[in-house]
Amino acid sequence: MADKGAIIYLLADNRKYIIGLSQYPEVDINFYLDRGVISTDNSRAFYLNKSLNLGLADYIFREISNPNERKGATLDNDFIITKFLSFFWEFDTLGKIIEEKLFKLKNILNNFDMKNKLDGKEIAISQIQKISLPKESEWKQVYQLIQGRKIYYSEIRQLLRENRVTIKELDKILIYLRLLGKLEVIPSLRYIDDKLICQRCDNHEDLVEIDCNYCQGKDYYCQECILMGESRLCRALYFIPVANFFQTFDIIEPKYRFNLTKLQQKVSDQLIDFLYENCQQALVWAVCGAGKTEVSFEVIADILSRGGKVLFAIPRKDVVIELAERLREAFPRVEVKAIYGGSEMKYQTASLVIATTHQVLRYYQAFDLIILDEMDAFPYKGSSTLKRSLHKAKKPRGKLIYMTATPSEEELVNLEDSNSKLIKLSARYHGYPLPEPEFIQSEIKYNQESKELTLPEVVIDKLKISVEQELYQVFIFLPSRELVEIVTQQISEYFPDINGQSWVQGSHSQDRQREEKREAFLAGDYPILVSTTIMERGVTVEKANVMVLFADWEYVFSEETLIQMAGRSGRSLKYPQGKVWFVGESISNQMEKAREKIQLLNEESAEKGYLKSSEQLIF
């Protein structure tokens, strides 16, 4: 039924009439008669058009009817239905209404060169009443599974298969659920104020005109969310919110790998308080390596204990997979589902869902709590589509928690202006200060045309001391793929090969061996990883220093990016200290800001007693 055409119908008795739109109008009419909304005595039904593309039918329906008529409008009190004397129904009130609707409908169809789609024929009520309505047990079973989704008909089919449910008359059940007010069916591209807007991602610019094989006519599809399936004018999109109530099931308590620090426990308590406060969203500003995931466990447990649903959204697939395992370990009695592009059984239901931000597009008013980690990371950052989808996936009274190590000034200002709460996790769990970057101002001779590069001696010296004397691994970050390849080759000349493998490996977004090199670096198989900013997140090694070359290239290395890269150093409990070098021909404004931000966070943590005293620090 996903691409089935739609019909505008009119149903009336001697007191009231309803104008409706349906892909299965017989179900609508039978529903209204069965519920007594329209009396079966003297009732009559008319189809105003022949089957139309859903998007066009939806537009015309809203143009020729008003909200009162869609719910049930009253006819003149003295009107008694009689046999209509002509096609134009000149002699009764209902006839005048139908004539008016057909006139408007004809004009619109003419504009679309579809005048042959005008109808107006009467449908025999006796034939319609032969169609049975769904059984309560059937529609309740379907409704229980599809709640909280924003999906296509084909996806509903897949969802039912994954949950091992077989339904014979799904089309009829979905229409029935719409009539009960439990879901909404709209075209996935919809005309609003004469503009086509994608109802899944809200895009109205990247729409492509096509000759559609489904509706056999001119159509459009949305390029913005094409990876999630084709959003077309003729394709139905189902919005199914979750009933907004809590039902107590059980007390859920998380299992921790370690005890929370004093600061982590404070932040955890603040998040619990946030659930019961008036504000709708909170921002957890947590420094890199602070253990921010663990501070969310108690607030997750609170929602789950009351029968609620939680979404943990993250921009990157690899982190989704990793976090899903951690959450299964923390909540062994809870159904945990990881959803990302290519994941299996993505439509199975679960109380705790971990998903990439793109997959959130498939949810609608589903979650009592949404936690967005790495809100500053691509692809979420800068995507208005993903930001809107996050809010649409939340129940109307649900709560939203953002987590980031690098909030922008704009985000902090917006936080103050909105009904939001700021919670800071300003120190790492091991109590050591964040490594503060050392600036190295030195000329890096680089000819972009000839690809010739000469690194300053100080760079090689720092690397040799780190790797050969201190036995540290080193991240080297560069602003481009080309520079990664050049620097990798040049630095390799200063270090030996072990078992045929260089001590220096380079990687970037186009590297097909990126994952293998990442895993080998994590395993300690080689000491120096040269990369673009793709490795600024999600790569944690026990004993690491960080070097950023061309750190003064501000169009690549922003304050936030530099802080994230510096955050790769000094993260482990065994080796809580590390070194960070920002190398450039000049000291950029972004370099200064990044170091100042790190210093301020260290000062704040020291003043509040979250850092170890100088006597406790081990050097």
Image (tube, rainbow, N blue to C red):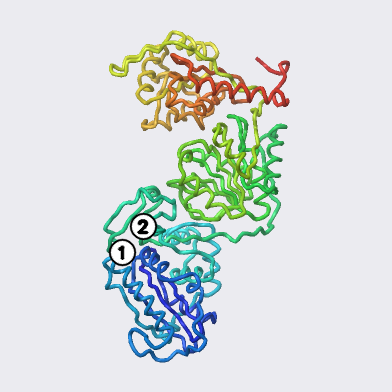
The quarter of the rendered structure image containing the N terminus is bottom left
Whether residues under marks 2 and 1 lie with C-beta atoms below 8 angstroms apart, the answer is yes
Vertical placement of residue 338 versus 403, above or below: below
Residue 455 visible to the viewer: yes
In this rendering, position of residue 38 left or right of residue 21: right
Q: Depth check: 141 or 124 in front?
A: 124
The quarter of the rendered structure image containing the C terminus is top right
* Residue 597 percent coordinates (x, y): 58, 24
Kind of residue sitting beneath label 2: Arg
In this rendering, position of residue 169 left or right of residue 284: left
Q: Is mark 1 on a helix, strand or loop?
A: loop
Count of marks placed on residues: 2
Task: Say which residue label 1 marks.
Answer: 215
* Residue 478 percent coordinates (x, y): 42, 22
> What residue is shown at x 60% (from left), y 30% (from top)?
287
Mark 2 vs 1, N-terminal side: 1
> What residue is shown at x 43% (from left), y 33% (from top)?
515
Q: How crowded is mark 1: few (under 14 residues within 10 Å), some or many (20 or more)?
A: some
* Residue 509 percent coordinates (x, y): 39, 32
Task: Say which residue label 2 marks.
Answer: 232
> Mark number for residue 586?
none
Vertical placement of residue 369 versus 267, above or below: below
Kind of residue sitting beneath label 1: Cys
> What residue is shown at x 49% (from left), y 69% (from top)?
67
- Label 2 and label 1: CA atoms lie apart by 10 Å
